[in-house]
Image (spheres, rainbow, N blue to C red):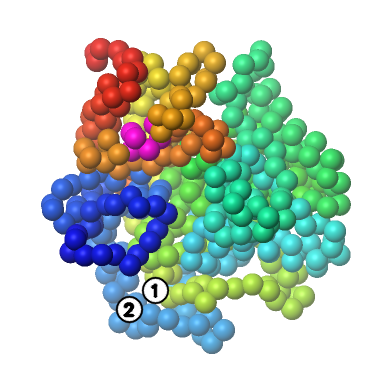
Amino acid sequence: MENKPSHLFYQSRNSRPFLDRGEGIYLFDESGKRYIDGSSGAMVSNIGHSNPRVLAKMKAQMDKATFGYRLHFRTHPSEELAAKTVAMTPEGLDRVFFVSGGSEAVESAIKLARQYALTQGRRSRYKVISRFPSYHGCTLGALDLTGYAPLREPFAPMMAGMPKIAAPATYLDRDNLTEEERGLKYAELLRDKIEELGPDTVLAFLMEPIGGASTGALVAPDSYYVRVREICNEYDVLLIYDEVMTGAGRTGKFLAAEHWGITPDIVAMSKGFGAGYAPLGAIVAGARLVEPVLDAGGFLHGFTYAGNPLACSAGLAVLEEMEDLGLIENAARMGEVLMAELRALMDRYPFIGDVRGKGLLTAFEFVADRATMKPLDPKLNAHERLVELAYARGLVIYSRRTRGGAAGDHFLVAPPLIITQAQIEEMMAILRDALDAFADEVGLPKETAA
């Protein structure tokens, strides 16, 4: 089968073996080779692979009905998943709209925000401020909000060009400010941008509470989150959290927003929400936004598979497994173990300049010089090369360019929330071997292992 011509195409010509099966944190190709899923795919497989209870509940729904169009029928799985989601999110977020993925969730969030503004007579409010770097999706609306040049620039003429402010990458700053002061400095960029654009034109601010692929698990200082919420309140700008990657327990809370006691106006979720068992995502908002939109004639938006009963049965089973197995709490505990292991890498590899993250959303970044945080020469293509070296050794990790896509190399380590300490140690042994090979290959220094 390997030698047959393929009619599929994806992002590149990079070839991979055929997947045979998944078991827990492990994946197996058709040759029998085992891989540790160190990135949960694309930070998706939060509860691991082939969970028997989730599969059983999906099978039970398949035996009843796999599709019921939302304009024709209500379904119990969608109603129950909506209720379960609201019960697990902060108070005030009590309305759910289902989608099939993260890009759809972000599109839905900004369209809900716009329609709400129209019900309030604020037709001039349409600008959505986001950050650079950032990643919010690949559909044109979500891509316009994305701050990642290689993905966005080819399509720039097709988009409006939504405004950006700098992401709070304080680890790169070389100043005399405290972390709290740096957090406030970056938050004030939002206030400045709103004033520059004209407050009556700004609809919303969209942010990843913890960075995803574009910034590699970037966590802002605590002061940042509180001040951003205050600024949005001051200007009556809606605060949208893109929790496509961080939601559903990955950071040690159901929503990352909970780490700072923040209640966004709208939350976008996907990835771990369905955990790879079915295409599923959602936006969660308050009745104060949704009810005026419905009263004005309805939400002018939708997808064919929104609220699909099979997908929602999978999502409901995933959330039940999270609770029954204590996976959110395990993400917090194992996140501390993983972070300690990653910090130890900095002692061993001088070219690792930063380690960051929260829970089981962590990353490390390569640099040429820790003092200046100068990135490695882009010609080394380090972000792809280390991934290949790890993959050859049976470990899957996820990487991107760090500095807006032009330079920099970071690697996300985000295993399923079921991972144990022994499995983390197994994963790290493979990662150290791959790092040793990379250092030898390109002539980078490394310390002698303790």
Q: Position of residue 437 (x, y in %)?
A: 25, 26
The residue at 19%/61% (across/down) is: 3
The residue carrying mark 1 is 310
Q: Residue at left 65%, top 41%?
A: 131
Question: In what quadrant of the picture does the C terminus appear?
Answer: top left
Residue underneath mark 2: 62
In this picture, residue 283 sits left or right of residue 309: right
Q: Which residues are magenta?
A: 382-387
Of the numbered discs 2 and 1, the one sitting upstream in the chain is 2
* Residue drawn 42% across the image and 81% down it: 67
| Tag 1: amino acid | Leu
- The answer to which image quadrant residue 267 occupies is bottom right
Determine whether 336 is above or below 304 in the image.
above
Judged from the image, the secondary structure of the residue bearing numbered disc 1 is: helix
Where does residue 42 sit, x and y in percent of width and height? 40, 50
- Write the residue at 58% across / 43% down: 149
Q: Residue furthest bottom?
A: 72
| Residue 129 visible at all | yes
Q: Quadrant of residue 176?
A: top right
Up-down relation of residue 341 to residue 115 (above or below): above
Badge 1 local density, few (<14 within 10 Å), some, or many (20+)? many
Q: Is residue 282 left or right of residue 126?
A: left
Please state the horizontal and vertical placement of residue 334, each as a whole percent of the image: 34, 36
Does residue 43 sit above or below 30 in this rendering?
above
